[in-house]
Image: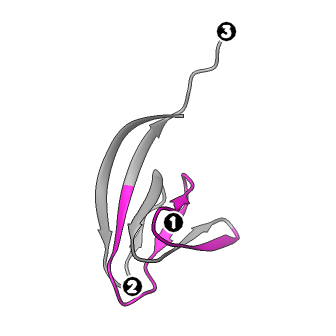
Amino acid sequence: MAPIGARLQSLAPGQVCAPGPLYLVLQGQARASLGEHSAQLGPHELAPPGATLHNDSAQPVILLALAVEPRSSAK
């Protein structure tokens, strides 16, 4: 997958961000949920595309949302 754009996003305490792009946690702690799986993420950790991120902490979480475009298959 090749990145096609990026934006900074902040999650306030108790806030949830919609599933979608590849998220990189820049600051704080977030819980990533994808299907039945869940993991706690800290700074410099990635959440996979399609994961929902939850801020369960009392501090804001700063994310870098990376929009990606699937590679086209070679013919």
- Of the numbered discs 3 and 2, the one sitting upstream in the chain is 2
Front position in the image: 8 or 18? 8
Residue 14 - label: 2
> Who's the residue at 51% across and 66% down the image?
52
Crowd around label 3: few <14 · some 14–19 · many ≥20 (10 Å): few
**In this picture, residue 65 sits left or right of residue 47:** left
For the residue marked with disc 1, what is the amino acid? Thr
Q: CA distance from mark 1 to mark 3?
A: 34 Å
User: Which circle's residue, 1 or 3, is located before the other in the chain?
Assistant: 1
How far apart are labels 3 and 2 at the CA level?
A: 46 Å
Task: Please give the residue where the numbered disc 3 appears in the rendered image.
Answer: 75
Going by the image, does 62 lie left or right of 46?
left
Numbered range of the magenta stretch? 36-64
Residue under the point 46% across and 57% down: 23
User: Which amino acid type is marked by label 3?
Assistant: Lys
Would you say 59 lies left or right of 30 here? left
- Dot label at residue 52: 1
| 49 in the magenta segment | yes
Image position, residue 65 (x, y; %): 38, 53
**Type of the residue with mark 2:** Gly
Where residue 17 sits: x, y (%)? 41, 67
Q: Residues within 10 Å of mark 1 (few under 14, many from 20)?
A: many
Dot 1 falls on a residue whose secondary structure is: strand
Q: Earlier in the sequence, mark 1 or mark 2?
A: 2
Locate the N terminus by quadrant.
top right
Helix, strand or loop at disc 2?
loop
